[in-house]
Image (cartoon, rainbow, N blue to C red):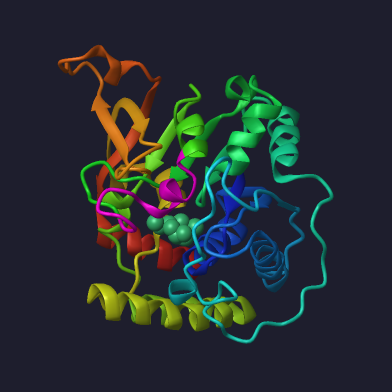
Amino acid sequence: MRHPILFDTDPGVDDAQAIAIALRHPELELLGLTTTYGNVDVEVATRNALLLAELAGREVPVAQGAAAPLIKPRHPAPAHIHGANGLGDIPLPAVRGRADPRSAAQFIVDTVNGRPGEVTLVAVGPLGNLAAALQLDPTLTERVNRVVIMGGAIREGGNVTPVAEANMFNDPDAAARVLTAGWPLTLVGLDVTHRCVLTPEHMARIEAGQGELGRVLAGSYAFYRDFYRDFLGIEGCCPHDSCALAWLLRPELFTTARGHLTVVTEGDAEGQTIFAPQGRAFIEARWARTPLVEVCLDADGPAVSDWIADSLA
Ligand code: RIB
Ligand code: CA
């Protein structure tokens, strides 16, 4: 069975790896890429998305979206992690194609409504595009097949603050709307992605298997790997965004739970995701006020990492 997906992204080195899987995997039908600011400015994200599709020899619509958070001022892009060009500052070929004239939000609404009940939204950046799509059409929640989000942390600490994961922290107001919208939703957060390491051996196999696209994935990986070595002492990198696709296609590798999510939008804990397991009574009822969702608590990290490399090798 092929899963029809829309992939919302801020490429980004680990986004690029996930986009490659979305473009290449035989069990996925990629209906389009929608772009947001986050790892880079949104114009750069759009250029990278167009480029990656062209290098894979695919004609896939790319629709540009959010340039800034819904409400708060934007945090600076992490050029020390992804490079100023989002792809490790390696030289990149010119892009031939152009973005779809529609906004990312309109593109999401049109695509989901065009195939009611079929489309899975996979989002791996700040969540402004999904929040804007909900604003355009609140009934979208009834016609999406599922929403899979790389973001948040349940038991794991944060990666940009002690409690917040980057995609949540970059737009907590959008995240709060999207995570509590009442659609079928799975959160794949740092509890999973920090168990996974894409090693240099994995990347050598990917480079050998992906032609011109492999050159860009390997070059950008080298830059990203330096960050992981210098800041986290890991020999390799966490393939955050690919984990969302791994959950979609290999859910048996993950441990999940159902419950209620809250996103903190103000104060020191801004961007934190708080999870209240289904049926667990806390001192106040308010932790159960949001709709039930599914969150990942753990994964077989080596198996997920191997699946990512195998998918691209
Ligand atoms: O916290 C990991 C997430 O933030 C990933 O989506 C990665 O691309 C970064 O932006
Ligand atoms: Ca991302």
Query: Is residue 13 at least partly visible in the picture?
Result: yes
Give me the residue at 47% from left, 51% from top: 170
Q: Quadrant of the N terminus?
A: top right
Of residues 75 and 109, the one drawn nearer to the viewer in this rendering? 75
**Residue 90 vs residue 304: left or right?**
right
Query: Is residue 2 at least partly visible in the picture?
Result: no
Q: Whole-percent x and y of residue 20?
A: 57, 64
Q: Whole-percent x and y of residue 151?
A: 40, 47
Is-magenta flag for residue 287? no
Q: Whole-percent x and y of residue 30?
A: 65, 50
Q: Quadrant of residue 236?
A: bottom left
Is-magenta flag for residue 167? yes
Give me the residue at 66% from left, 63% from top: 49
Relative to 22, is 261 above or below? above
Q: Quadrant of ligand 1?
A: bottom left
Q: Whole-percent x and y of residue 209?
A: 53, 77
What's the magenta region? 159-172
Give me the residue at 21% from left, 43% from top: 155
